[in-house]
Image (tube, rainbow, N blue to C red):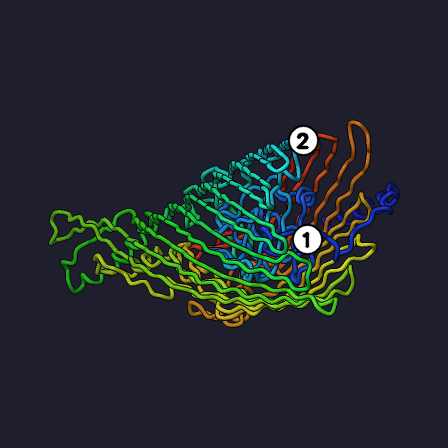
Amino acid sequence: MQKPSLFLFIIISILTNSAFAQNDTTQQIEYPPISTIPPIIVIATKSTFDNSATSHTVINEQEIISAQISNLSDITRIAPNFYMPDYGSKGTASVFVRGVGARMNEPSIGVYVDGIPYLDKHSFNFDFYDINSIVLLRGPQSTLFGRNSIGGVVQISTLSPFAFEGTKLSISYGNRNAYRYSAAHYTQLSDNFGVSFAVNTSGDDGFFRNEFLGTYDSQKTRGVRAKIDWRLPQNWTVQANVLFDQTLQNAFPYAYFDKELQRPTTIAYNHQGIYNRDVLNSGLLLSKKMKKTQFTSATSYQHLNDSIQMDQDYTIDSLFRLNQTQCQNSITQEFTWRSTSNKPYSWIVGAFGFVKSNDINSLMTMEQGMMNTIQGHMNAAMDEARKEKPKTPFVDLGSQIDIPGRFKMNNYGAAVYHQSELKFLEKFTATAGVRLDVEQTAIDYNSQAILNTTVTGEIFPVPFHSKIVLSAFGKEHETFVNITPKFSLKYDISNNAYVYATVAQGKKSGGYNYSMLSSVFQKTLNEMRSHVKSDTLEIAEDMLYYKPESLWNFEVGSHFSLFENKLRVAVAAYYIHYSDMQIVSTLATNNGSRMIVNAGRSTNYGTEFSARWVVTHNLIFNAQHGYTRATFDNFVFDGNDYSGNYVPFVPRNTLSAGVDYTIDINKRLLENIVVAAQYSYYTNIYFTERNNVQEKFYDIVNATLTFKTKIFDYGVWVKNAFNRKYMVFYCESMGNGFAQQGKPLQFGGALSAKF
């Protein structure tokens, strides 16, 4: 662990000395105080956060390039208390902020792109190209953003043709044939009408080898984005955008986990894991600015179609395999109306509605290896029965059992909200808001286990073939009413500093499990003895249904600047009281199926620190640290008490530090050279409720060296420069543990042009 730290310290020391030596003109540069920074608008004038009473991270276009942020997961490297492990497939996009997150079903973090909400986490992990800015708001944002923002919100803005006009081309190539090509054109057809069109493709040959099949976790992604910005008379504006993204992926490179050595070993299973996904997201924003107010309408349509093929025992034995497809469609509509005057009192009111449908078709297959186990149970029972009834027949259950399932999930919801802000006594600002959400979720399920049996014996001289069907079907629905208030108080110490305190509640609706039904069938089959017949199974309510979760977040913090506003610092401390936390568990299943259960209570608390220091125009430092301690206060499940244990998938510490250094050349063929390095460090990530598997710590160094001309940029890059080995995921199946490692050393070159 010493090498990266020493490496970064040496680079920073050298760059600091040389930057001060080479550049004295920057003394004339003036940096604005915090209070005068123009506000950045979140989600089409829903709120501003330049001086907001919340912990937030703003990442601009240059920082996105320097930190090599190419998808949502990469934000983990530079945002305190944000963690999105890159594992499984692009559909397993699990995001955690301050220990609040979700690995299944509905997300706990809201993601918006150009003002449009992405309702499903399966669409979160897409390629970034020509992103203008990324904003992370930590803590519950339920009052303004509603459902699925109990942990925070990520707002992504793409480049507008009114911000840049021209063409951008980019090529990157690295080891394992990792490629990334993008092209975009931005043009203004008139002073009031602009359009843009961008395409992107990326992929690689994979980094982890399945030793049994000889395959790698390769992937290919293609994307297209189009955008229209139109400024109409009478202060109307229109923004329309559409994004299509396609993924083809050899997925789930899970290695057998040696529990004695506490590390992953070899990837070896006999059914190739595959994840394919098509995503279409489209949105229309209409805005009207009036004398003292602004009205906005945001409409979206989203479509997702994906398929999974998975070896669920992750071994070379033929035990379980899964084939699953899902087709999602959703529509959202939001209206907001807010004041825009500079008076002490300001307000915003809004209404939101959505419809979401999801059709899921799955096929779990119990293969020969599992059938041998079930057959053995039945043979033993029948051998025992023959002691009293010698003519008891022999029953052959066959070589496999198919368990098809059809699940239709529907969600509907509507909300109204209001937030007021009052400035008083010159330096104080009080904010209060409340939101009412009404949501209904429903499930229509029909699943079966089909056995083709053969009966022989003394009373069956001719083999008798029969089909036995175990069924589980039903319809359920539940309505949730959530009220989420928020209160904050801010005090402006000066133009360059303020402190704040915030209390906010976040709520997330409950729902229904479906992936665990195959486990119910398996348990029933394992318990079969001499009595085998078709039957309809009753699904226990506590297995099918999980309750809503809620939390209260108490937060204090400060934002301030020093050294003529060149150093900007943000600090925060928070305490979260969590009730009925929705947590993913495999404890009640043994075939790799997962289900959501409710932990009784948990407590999360921690701190956040971030700083950006523009030492000179040529030298910029950044540093971030997040600390989260998330533990179960009361969690008893599956006969075990996990109270006092740490919540899984939550790093105790997230630390990063980086430097951007520019060497001015000012020649016709070379304007400058930019060196950027980022160091990231993570500790104490547990992967199970039992806390018996953890990644104690790991660190990563990424760096770029770029040569810039008037039109072209070219250079080299490296990720995980010291080839650190670390775990990002762990799961269990059939009593065995399996884990995925983070990506190893990656390096390559890049060329881009802008004209």
Q: Quadrant of residue 181?
A: top right
State whether residue 169 is above or below residue 681.
above
Residue at 63% across / 42% down in the picture? 745
Disc ID at residue 691: none
Q: Foreground residue, 652 or 52?
A: 52
Q: Amino acid at mark 2?
A: Ala
Q: Foreground residue, 484 or 552?
A: 484
Mark 1 Cα shell of 10 Å, populated few (<14), some (14-19), many (≥20): few
Q: Foreground residue, 378 or 173?
A: 173
Disc ID at residue 39: 1
- Which residue matches tag 2? 753
**Helix, strand or loop at mark 2:** strand
Residue at 62% across / 41% down in the picture? 159
**Helix, strand or loop at mark 1:** loop
2 or 1: tag closer to the N-terminus: 1
Give the farthest residue toward the top.
669
Q: Amino acid at mark 1?
A: Pro
Residue 317: give x, y in percent of width and height. 39, 47
Q: Look at the image and tell me in which quarter the C terminus lies.
A: top right
Whether tag 2 and tag 1 are in contact, CB under 8 A, the answer is no
Evaluate whether residue 524 shows in this view.
yes
Residue 258: give x, y in percent of width and height. 52, 54
Residue 718: give x, y in percent of width and height. 67, 40
Residue 24: give x, y in percent of width and height. 88, 43
